Image (spheres, grey):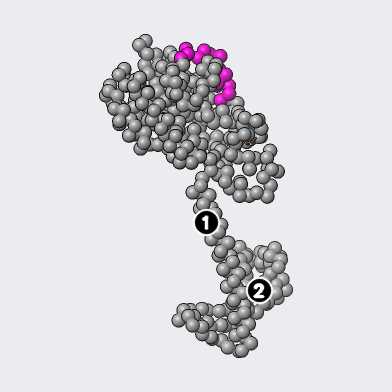
Amino acid sequence: MNLPRPLSHSSITLYNECPQKFKFKYVDKIPEKPKHFFSYGQSVHLALEFFYGAKEPKAPSLEDLLKHFREIWVKTGYRDENHEAELFEEGRQLLARFHDKHAKSYHVPFSVEYGFTFEHEGIPLTGKVDRIDKLPDGRLSILDYKTGKKLAAGRLDLDAQLTMYQFACESQLGAEVGELIFYHLPTLKEHRTVRRGAPLVKELTTRIVATAEGITKERFDPKPTENACRWCDYKPLCPIYKDQYAGMPAVAAKASGEPELAALVDAYGDALAKAAAAKAEADAAAAALSASLKKKNYVRAFGERFEVSSSPAVKWEFPDKKKVLDLLKTAGLYEKVLAPSAPLVNKLVEDKALDADLRARLTELGERVESTDLKLKGL
Ligand code: SF4
């Protein structure tokens, strides 16, 4: 198997956290449920992309920034309307504080939302850097916004995401990275560190190669841990938890996390069930009608809205389809019926021009069932 998509920092992290979860998400392409923290983070990121996306060295007004925030607000994943309103207001206040701090000293960054795609040892890699600035000495300053409440102590010095960004920018932009920044937005605090040294870059590239190898060799064993499993949407599908969810198919359907899709799936299932019930009802009515017409020796009858006419018909039923197939193949007639579908074999067995011996052997394999064809039309 090839890689299902270029590797990114988050997909590499996911594979190493739990290969089975990676498979559900990226190989089977089962979407996760929307999460409010992703929606909120994406909304704030889009607003800051707008703020730093100006072509002139002049910050957009606070009014324009907040108007944009309202327009791009991602609405999915919140508990309810109150929860959504609470986080929307939190985002507005955060942006107002950010604008107050940075509008006066505004600068046009070297790049905003810099997307990269490149290969390392034949492994496609992709990602997006929130912001890149040029330092006075010409080197690059790489910045990643964080919207979570807390930034874990020590994360800045080892975090593989910043290492990946440094690796990507240096190989794609041909400039050395001078500093790496996590900008913690709730506190408006920039946490800086110097560029990663060779050991951390080597650790990253080793991890990239090992991850790609695991995926291409289809190593997707579940790796249950309290942290990974607690919020995992794929539990109903996961082999580790399948016993807990046995007999609860509806729960698995909800794992798709796509309410509109789930509604369409259910609507399709409901419609097919209704169609099957309607067909069973129509078959029963047809059988009763045929029997009644036959008893009275009628070939035509009228209702108030429909009329029906009947004609005798013959149908062959073959319990052992394989024997029929073998016989037709031996007689060189397989092509005549292509795949031996019931209507075509029925036509063949009633064909008077068919070799008498073959016809006899074919009829031995089946049972002749007399039935009635009904033609219905509206009045
Ligand atoms: S429930 Fe746990 S073990 Fe199963 S896929 Fe999710 S994270 Fe992996």
On the image, the x and y values in percent for residue 79 come to 50, 39
Identified at 41% across, 30% down, the residue is 91
Image quadrant in which the C terminus is located: bottom left
User: Which three-letter amino acid code belongs to the residue tagged 1?
Assistant: Ala
| Quadrant of the image occupied by residue 61 | top left
Indicate whether 212 appears above or below 265. Answer: above
Where is residue 178 shown, x and y percent of the image? 43, 13
Residue behind mark 2 = 316
- Please state the extent of the stretch shown in magenta in the rendering: 192-208
- Residue in view at x 57 percent, y 43 percent: 255
Residue at mark 2: C-beta within 8 A of ligand 1: no
Give the quadrant of residue 185.
top left
The answer to whether residue 236 shows anywhere in this view is yes
Whether the residue carrying mark 1 lies under 8 Å from ligand 1 is answered with no
Q: Is residue 360 magenta?
A: no
Does the CB distance between marks 1 and 2 fall below 8 Å? no
Residue 203: in magenta span: yes
Secondary element at tag 1: helix
Name the residue at 52% across, 56% down.
267
- Residue 163 placed where, x, y %? 50, 19
Left or right of 103 on screen, residue 205? right
Give the dominant element type of the magenta stretch: helix, strand or loop.
helix
Badge 1 is on which residue?
267
Outermost residue to the top: 137
Q: Residues within 10 Å of mark 2 (few under 14, many from 20)?
A: some
Quadrant containing ligand 1 reads: top right
The kind of residue on which mark 2 rests is Trp
Task: Choose the circle earlier in sequence order: 1 or 2.
Answer: 1
Select label 1 or label 2 by which is in front: 1
